[in-house]
Image (cartoon, helix red, strand yellow):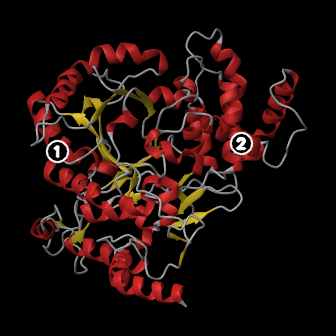
Amino acid sequence: MLLALRRIRLFSRVGFNSLSMASTLSYSSSIPLKRPRDGSISSVHDPPPPAPPPATSQRFKNSIVLAPMVRSGTMPTRLLALKYGASLVWGPEIIDKAMLHAKRVVDEKTGIVSFEGISSSIWSCHPAERPYLIYQIGSSSPPLAVAAALLVSRDVSGVDLNCGCPKPFSTSGGMGAALLDTPDILCDILTSLRAALPPHISVSCKIRLLPDPQKTLDLVERIVKTGISCLTVHCRTRNMRKGERAIPDRLRAIVDFVRSMRDESGNPYDVAVLANGDVEGWSDIQRVKDITGADGLMVATKAEENPSCFSETMVDVDELVSRYLRIARYTSNTFGNTKHCISSFKSAPGVVNQRAALKALRTTIAQAKDYPSFTTFMLERHAAEVANGTRSGEFDEENWGGDKEIEGIVDSIKSRPPPAWWVGVEEWERANPLESQGMDVDIGEDGIKKLLERDREERPRKKSKVDPADVKTSVPTHPGTATETPSHTTNPEPGALATPGPLFMSYVPPMVAGRNERSPSPERAVSKATLIS
């Protein structure tokens, strides 16, 4: 009785203070509390994981990376590049609208994420490559770029804006190298991406040199101030093509300029600069760094010819083709894209009798109409690999051992030291679904429809280059005179002289536009070119 009275008096003295202190605890009132044996109060649930560290330039420094290449930068090429030592891999440029029209699908068997277009997948990735995968976007609209980037933000580690592609399919829509002429739009897109994406997702861009060195530095200054983590410079101007030698000497001034820049607080900007253009691969690292002073290198053509260029010792074409075919067939890569990629493979420099040794393989590739066309070649490769001890077991006629090939690549990727920029990312994302984030952009189905409709309404309408008056006067009106076909005619229907779209029709690679052309076969004629108008 006496003990009970003492407890009542003690509660009357400190009860209200204790209640007020309990109300200030960070635990939610909906989460039950329990008292462990040590007497302290704790939550039944574990505390939420901390937010990952923001993206910095460190992931791009001292790196040798795979460049974004239309058709050649698909998932099988990226996986091989990572296997042979690429620090990071860029995916091929995908136009924002194509991604917004796509549907995200996850293969339960392989875990591969695919964004399905009208007829087939326009972009896919493997979970193992995500910490090293950069998604390159083609865009000339900040809202569309943000929406497309958010859709893939849980499948990549960074987003890169293409500001250097000189091909008409990109520039005709104001994208690619056309952004170099509209720096306000370029910087607006980068600023919007950085503000909308999670801090651990890096934002970067790839540009070309301007003819005037000073104007190049002025553009670089504006780009660096948008908050990007990496700037890749293709050491060619917009009018230069792949056959012309790059001019890496001009990159040194850009690198020094970026490193000398300071923000309002007097701190240097955290931006890495990568060199691109005539980079030969691993063997070329020191030469390019001595010339440019760049933080890293981006390899394009040489990686297209031999994805093992990221390693000190390059492998032969037979091995590359067999590995690529196993991966491509197991992951259902379109045969047309597979044939294009393996047709570009070349042996390492210095291989004797290269043409003679590859003649039979080149013939097989040229005549192939589908994956079964390579069965004999894959059977011979399997027997040779079993004989030299690099492979065991019987030949798998269904997928040629593609599952084991993928497992080997995944193991080689996971054997790397865990990247510092990816610590805690997956745990945080599981606790914070994308839908729960306070986003200003609605990336639901209805939100995307409204976004595309608004963009269609705001898109400038072009005028016909043909003057109707000229067309009328070009047709003879005198009676008895033979009528000739006019050189220019117009559609008499309303709206023919003011239609939306770019100024001219241009070829768009199907993978960029969101459509994959089917491979030609004796039973099916070659499809027509994909046009955008």
Q: Is residue 163 above or below residue 141?
A: above
Return the residue nearer the eye: 266 or 81: 266
Q: In this view, does 238 lie to the left or right of 104?
A: left
Label 1, label 2: how far apart the Cα atoms are: 42 Å
Indicate the quadrant containing the N terminus: top left, top right, bottom left or bottom right. bottom right
Q: What label sits on residue 46 in the rendered view?
A: none
Residue for badge 1: 225
SS at circle 2 = helix
Residue occupying the point 26% across, 75% down: 454
Q: Where is residue 475 in the image (x, y as percent from the top left)?
A: 17, 68
Return the residue nearer the eye: 334 or 5: 5
Q: In this view, does 503 lie to the left or right of 348?
A: left
Q: What residue type is labelled 1?
A: Lys
Q: What residue type is labelled 2?
A: Glu
Residue 159 visible here: yes
Q: Is residue 115 above or below residue 229?
A: below
Q: What label sits on residue 407 in the rendered view?
A: 2
Q: Which of marks 1 and 2 is nearer the N terminus?
A: 1
Q: Where is residue 11 in the image (x, y as percent from the top left)?
A: 41, 84
Q: Is residue 483 left or right of residue 420?
A: left
Return the residue nearer the eye: 432 or 31: 31
Quadrant in the picture for residue 289:
top left
